[in-house]
Structure formats: structure tokens, C-alpha cells
Image (cartoon, rainbow, N blue to C red):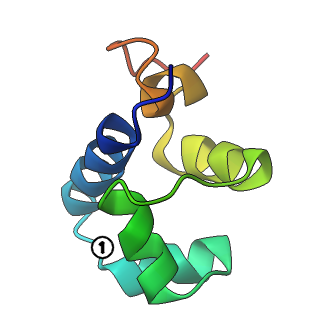
Amino acid sequence: MLDLNIFGERLRCLRKEKNLVLADIAKLLDVSTTQAGDMENGKTGTSLYRLVILAEFYHVSTDYLLGITDDPTWR
């Protein structure tokens, strides 16, 4: 089962590792800063299309972002 809190925390950690702000991710995903913040706060998920954009941008697997695995390895 998808845990939006894990998804959000992983997004936040990855963003901070790259020294980015929410506005950077919002622009990447073509969403508002509020929407990007809601994803990081575990209030909402995202579309499959945006999930793939995030995985490719951060070079991690979608399974890692979704909390299915703790291995972020890009495959």
C-alpha cells in the first residue's frame, strides 16, 4: 500500500541533497509550489507521468520513491 508520508519524505530528502527549493521542483513538474509542497508533506501523490519525471531527475527507481524498496538504485 502506498504510504504518502514515505513518498513525501523521500522527495524532500532528494530535493535537499541537490540544494533545490520547492519552486525548482514545481517548475520541473509544471505544478504550483503549493502542489509540490503537498507532495512532500504527504498530503497528495502525483501522476505516473510526473513520478517518472521525478525518478529520472533524481536517478532513483520509482519503487524507491513509492516506498516499495529502500534501494534507490536506478534501473
In the picture, residue 15 is in which quadrant? Answer: bottom left
61 shown above or below 51: above
Side (left or right) of 12 relative to 75: left
Front residue (pair 30, 5): 5
Q: Residue at x 22, y 49 (%)?
A: 13
Q: Give the position of the C terminus as an image quadrant.
A: top right
Residue 55: x percent and y percent? Answer: 57, 41
Looking at the rendered structure, the secondary structure element under dot 1 is loop
Against 5, residue 75 (above or below) is above
Q: Nearer the viewer, residue 41 or 14?
A: 41
Mark 1 closeness class: few <14, some 14–19, many ≥20 residues within 10 Å:
few
- Report whether 8 appears left or right of 45: left
Instruction: Report the front residue among 44 and 61.
Output: 44
Q: Residue sitting at 79 percent across and 51 percent down?
A: 49
State left or right for residue 17 relative to residue 39. Answer: left
Splitting the image into 4 quarters, where does residue 4 fall? top left
Task: Please give the name of the residue rendered at 69% of the width and 55% of the height, measured from the top-left corner.
Answer: 50
Q: Where in the figure is residue 8, as x and y percent of width and height?
A: 34, 50
Count how many numbered circles sit on residues in the image: 1
* Residue type pointed to by label 1: Leu
Left of 4 or right of it: where is 70? left
Q: From the viewer's perspective, is residue 28 above or below residue 1?
A: below
Q: Which residue is mark 1?
A: 20
- Residue 1: % across, % down: 50, 19
Which quarter of the picture shows residue 29? bottom right
Residue furthest right in the image: 49
* Position of residue 66 measured from the top left corner of the image (x, y, whole percent): 49, 30
Q: Residue at x 50, y 77 (%)?
A: 35
